[in-house]
Image (cartoon, rainbow, N blue to C red):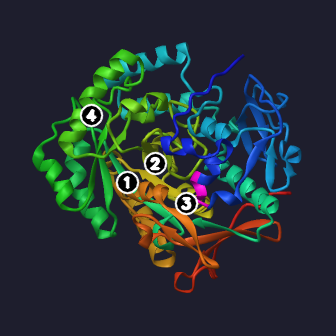
Amino acid sequence: MHVEYQSVTKDSAKDEPTLIQAVRYRYRCPEEFVNFRLSGELSLDSGYFQLGRGTTCYGRSVNGTHQAQWSSFLRDMLPSVSFDGTLLVLPFDPNEVIENLQLERYPNVQLNRYERVVKNIYYWLRPYTNRSLRSYIQRLRAADWQKKQFPQWPVDTTVENICEVLLMLSLRASGADRIPFIWFWPDGARGCISMTHDVETVVGRDFCEQLLDLDDSFGIKASFQIIPEKRYRVTPEFLSQLRDRGFEICIQDLNHDGRLFDEREEFLRRVALINLYGREYGAKGFRSAVLYHNPEWYKDLDFSFDMSIPNVAHLDPQKGGCCTVMPYFIGDMLELPVTTIQDYTLFYVLNERSIDLWKTQIGMILAKNGLASFIVHPDYIIEPETQAVYKDLLAMLGELRKREAVWFALPREIDSWWRARDRMSIVKDGESWRIVGEGAERAVLAFARVMDGRLIYELADTAQGEQPICEVKSQTSHAM
């Protein structure tokens, strides 16, 4: 099967040498430190392979050394990587592989015809069901979720792992003892936390005032995703209340019927209205209902960022996952992936009433210096039992903020930072390096180096040029 790849990543990357775009985009490091070429001609078809133990890739490879279906015995391409002077010679295209993961171009992600029919029947009957019946149906549909090995539950960091391996190999190829790069978050924050609230019903809308008080009592600001049509009345007073208290407004779908991406013509009709509501509400961000998504159509959305693609989606109606805990561009739109389990799924599909899973996910995300993004619905934390769990989460996040340098940010703030960072660069300044570009005053110079076979990141002391003073986090070890 011949597959044609049409890139939908950010246009600014087109001017960079072909194979290094993904690594350069992640690290914003000087081009001289990363230099790749292919070891041969890529196959016509795509498949699964590994880059080091446990790091699953999907894409084309030299000589077609991959498998059509995922298994635990995939071919490892790491031993096939070689060096040609300072060139890293690869048997695959890392940009293609990473984009395939981020855009879920691997098999069994999009709904098949049978699943689409079942979905349409479900949403037709949904107004006549109650929460207990809906959660029972969703548990039934997700009955085999624990058998799925890819993406990896409860957090998949495949994209981060691939980039780390390639950076380690680049260090070896270049002969450098360390590679300078622009740290991921402003002011040297270890990672980022972002709270979002999807408002789904009249009851949820009416609870928002209490939720504002609750969030504020823990020093948390959040975005509220508003459904513009049919679900409830959206008044200027309601929107002003959110804005005036420093919270963010984003658009959630059009009417939350789960059919936004069913047909292209109907999608375009709805998107025209969605874009109008976005301008009317002053919203920079979008999220689709039930996290249904089709990144190939995002160019028609007139928003700066999207928040509809899960990191791993075994328990969501649309399976898949973008396999990264970092923001990434889809064309000119920034994707802020959903990296933790939704409250509804935790409470009513897994029947959990604790923050243990959220704690585990936060730990895994921050170990990769990533974005921990939450979806908590006002509709599902009205009851005392579930509200108590949410309060436990807020308290835990508050303790995390006191203990560690983590950036708590609204989605629009993350969007602004990530776009500014994308325009920055590192230049040589005598024997040191410095970051240039608008917003560079919040950027921190960092270094990647190998210590005891592990990739580590260190922050530089901005007062003393490039001298590293802080080891941020040891990264996953990869055999070389």
Along the line of sight, the residue nearer the viewer: 365 or 382: 365
Instruction: Determine the image quadrant of residue 476.
Output: bottom right
> Which of label 4 and label 1 is nearer to you?
4
Residue at image coords 26%, 58%: 247
Question: What is the C-alpha distance between the residues marked 1 and 2?
Answer: 8 Å
| Secondary structure of residue under mark 3 | helix
Name the image quarter holding the N terminus: top right
In the picture, measured across the screen, residue 315 lies left or right of residue 36, that is left
Residue identifier under label 4: 275
Residue at image coords 56%, 66%: 426
Please provide percent x and percent y for residue 361: 57, 56
Question: What is the C-alpha distance between the residues marked 4 and 3?
Answer: 33 Å
The earlier-in-sequence mark between 4 and 3 is 4
Instruction: Determine the image quadrant of residue 202.
Output: top left
Span colored in magenta: 25-29
Please provide percent x and percent y for residue 391: 38, 63
Residue identifier under label 1: 411
Residue at image coords 70%, 49%: 162
Q: Is residue 26 magenta?
A: yes
